[in-house]
Amino acid sequence: DKIPGARGVGAKTAAELLKRYDGLEAALADGRFATEAEALRLYLRVATMDAAAPLPRLEDQAPTWGRSAELAREWGLTRLSERLAALEG
């Protein structure tokens, strides 16, 4: 997902922490990740698709239908790939 997590915490440790704590706030209340608390809260909001999460503004740009078609094809989305390729013109 390319969303960072807590420094030094891999998948195995993250799974253990999820078993121990009920969620991020419980881990923070226990003194875990004090220096990263705000960043971790933001990452959680982004990961859970919180529409109010502060994301950087992206400049408008022309769609790259051809590249989108390639990605859809790589992901096995053949019909979508064909539709995107048709938009390329």
Image (tube, rainbow, N blue to C red):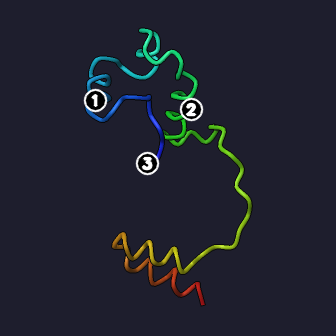
Given the image, on which type of amino acid does mark 2 rest?
Answer: Leu
Which residue in the structure is indicated by mark 1?
A: 15
Residue situated in front as seen by the camera: 4 or 68: 4
Question: Helix or strand or loop: what does disc 2 sit on?
Answer: helix
Position of residue 60 relative to residue 11, above or below, is below
Instruction: Identify the secondary structure beneath mark 3.
Output: loop
In the rendered structure, which amino acid carries the disc numbered 1?
Answer: Ala
Quarter holding the C terminus? bottom right
Mark identifier at residue 23: none
Which residue was labeled with disc 3? 1
Q: Residues within 10 Å of mark 1 (few under 14, many from 20)?
A: few
Residue at 32% of width from left, 33% of height from top?
10
The residue furthest bottom is 89
Mark positioned earlier in the residue sequence (3 or 1): 3
Pointer 2: what residue?
Answer: 42
Left or right: residue 56 compared with residue 40: right
